[in-house]
Image (cartoon, rainbow, N blue to C red):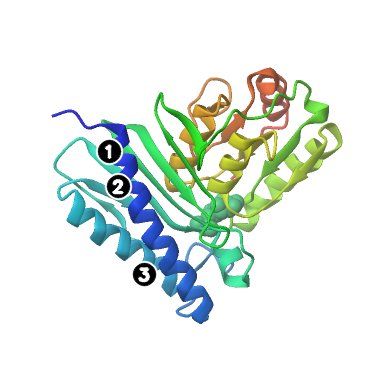
Amino acid sequence: MTVEPNELLQIAVRIAGGAADLARQMRDEGVTGITTKSSATDVVTAADRAAERYVREALRDSRPGDAVLGEEAGESPGKGAVRWILDPIDGTVNYLYGVPHYAVSLAAEVDGEVVAGVVRNPVSGEQWTATRGGGAWRGEVRLVGSTVTELSQTLLATGFGYAAARRVHQARVVAKLLPIVRDIRRFGAASLDLCFAAEGRVDAYYEKGLNLWDHAAGGLIAAEAGLRVGGLSGAGAGPDLVVAAPPAIWEPLQDALVRLDAAGGP
Ligand code: IPD
């Protein structure tokens, strides 16, 4: 039986909307259940866990048998071709501090290919969606990305991992990029960085060390907005590097990232 990307998107939008409402309501009531994961700065809250539980239960009701990969509860194998990829709260540090820039990110893969994705900011209500081949959208607005043609004019978003050793390397890379681009932005939620790139709110984005749940939905949205999305030197987007850039600056940005060994280090 074929699975329609649009059907999966409708399910994703409905469920991500419920999870976003839950996360926002829990934020309004005060952040609780704060623990740490990979390092002392890598936090998780009761809301991350509750939003993930909500999405998993809703997916079980709508599409029993699908696999789910989620940031907080890991991989649950399924029986068919569909796997859901979830970050219940991307930008947890922003969430913790009350910075209104975090998102629920939910993507659907069929046979290993992401075909539908939604990223929703629960505070602003902004929602970005895409289906493979169906374009990228914020509400009714079709997204086309930036038309920048020079690296020196590029507003470049990035992010940093939670491990101190990785940050040392990332800081060296960003210090060398800063003088050769328009400016750097570090907003704190990778999925939203990719949606901002899709929308032209930044020109391009790169980051080392992302997990699939950080970039599955946003990567599709950026690609469907006409950006090139991948890793370094022909590699796919993955933990070594995720890059999203308009075609005209893809090569110069790749050259700079290769020269600075952006995919290297711990
Ligand atoms: C993090 C955010 C951040 C990025 C980190 C991610 P989380 O996700 O997306 O912007 O720089 O690499 O881990 O931990 O808030 O879900």
- Amino acid carrying mark 3 in the image: Ala
- Amino acid carrying mark 2 in the image: Ile
Residue drawn where x is 50% and y is 81% of the image: 29
Q: Nearer the viewer, residue 173 or 26?
A: 26
Q: In the rendering, which numbered label is found on residue 169?
A: none
- How far is disc 2 from disc 1 in space, using C-alphas? 6 Å
Q: In the rendering, which numbered label is found on residue 50?
A: 3
Query: Residue extending furthest front?
Result: 140
Pointer 2 residue:
11
Mark 1 and mark 2 in contact (Cβ < 8 Å)? yes
Mark 1 beta carbon near ligand 1 (under 8 Å): no
The quarter holding residue 169 reads top right
Using a 10 Å C-alpha cutoff, classify the residue at mark 1 as few (fewer than 14 neighbours), some (14 to 19) or many (20 or more).
few
Instruction: Say whether residue 38 is left or right of residue 14.
Output: right
Q: Picture coordinates of residue 181 (x, y %)?
A: 81, 33
Pointer 1 residue:
7
User: Is there any visible trace of residue 119 in the rendered image?
Assistant: yes
- The quadrant in which the C terminus is found is top right
- Quick check: 82 above or below 52? above
- Amino acid carrying mark 1 in the image: Glu
Element at label 2: helix
| Sequence-wise first label, 3 or 2 | 2
Instruction: Say whether residue 107 is left or right of residue 205.
Output: left
Q: Nearer the viewer, residue 229 or 236?
A: 229
Q: Picture coordinates of residue 194 (x, y %)?
A: 57, 40
